[in-house]
Amino acid sequence: MRAEKFNCTASGKDGFVLVAVLWILGLLSAAVSIYAIFVIDSAKGLPFYDERLKADALVSAALELTAYHQLNAAPPSRPTQGQFSFRLGGANVAVEFQSEVARLDLNAAPKPLLAGLFVALGANRSDAEMYSDRVVSWRTSPSPGDKLSAPGRANTGYRQREGQFPHPYELTLLPGLPPALAQRALRFVTVYSGRPEVNVRDAAPEVLAALPGMSEKLVTAVLMQRQTSPQDGEALLELLGASKQYATLEGNNALRVRANVAFDNGRRASSEVVILVFQAGDQPFSIFSRRDEL
């Protein structure tokens, strides 16, 4: 009887150990499977990250070449816009650049120009005047007797910056400005120009339409003049009439660069970068803002 009981107990312990070993083997098998999946997924993702690194290097090359184009010319004759392309590292890169003076500066543009842009983008005149008031109020500090901004600060129910816009996207924070209108306006505004005027030689049709006194017919005439005689800037200014006071033919050292990268395998990447080109020094340019897409 004792021998039988001893054998039964030993058999139970052996069974417990066997189950534990099977559980451990199962866990190890699962861990190996998970690690294998991780290795496979990592291997699949390596080309993507490799292309991101290549795209970043190609965009850097595009920026350096743009700065070279600017620094290679004397300041009065530097182009305010242009395009070029190059091939490098198994990819074709198309580059376009344009001076930021082609856009309305949220920190410098006068109220009539701001209101004109909102009208050109679909707002009615009274609403456009209100939106331009809020832009001016947002960017300026209150002062005694400030008839433009003091009522707005008292009644709008929001706390404005009372200082310059640090980035164009802050325009979307203005209460009362329809989000869709703010998004449309982002294509035509900047904070890197520092000029109250706009470069009518490079400006988009919507920006030309923002000039006070401009009609659809006059905008068309300006666009035709730019196409037929792109170098005759003085004739272009005279064509503007009273709107001439809001226009310029000059650029500045802030450039918006668009680089489109097309890899041989079909993948594409694009970047939009605003740079400041320096006149002299070891560093040719500095980056203000950058947006990448892959």
Image (cartoon, rainbow, N blue to C red):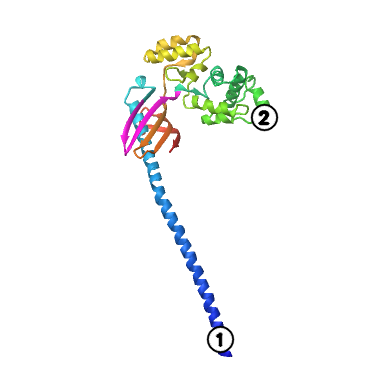
Question: Start and end of the magenta stretch?
Answer: 83-100
Picture disc at residue 6: 1
Q: What's the residue type where badge 2 is placed?
A: Gly
Label 2 vs label 1: CA separation?
86 Å
Residue 157, disc: 2
Q: Nearer the viewer, residue 224 or 267?
A: 267
Residue farthest toward the right in the current orientation of the protein: 155
Using a 10 Å C-alpha cutoff, classify the residue at mark 1 as few (fewer than 14 neighbours), some (14 to 19) or many (20 or more).
Answer: few
* Image quarter hosting the N terminus: bottom right
Quadrant in which the C terminus is drawn: top left
155 or 97: nearer the eye?
97
Q: Amino acid at mark 1?
A: Phe
Task: Give me the residue at 57% from left, 30% from top.
Answer: 172
Mark 1 element type? helix
Residue at image x 58%, y 90%? 2
Q: Is residue 136 magenta?
A: no
Neighbours of disc 2 within 10 Å: few (<14), some (14-19), many (20+)? few
Q: Is residue 196 visible?
A: no
Quadrant of the rendered structure where residue 51 is?
Answer: top left
260 up-or-down from 220: above or below: below
- Outermost residue on the bottom side: it is 1
Residue 65, position as x, y percentages in the image: 34, 31
Looking at the image, is mark 2 or mark 1 earlier in the sequence?
Answer: 1
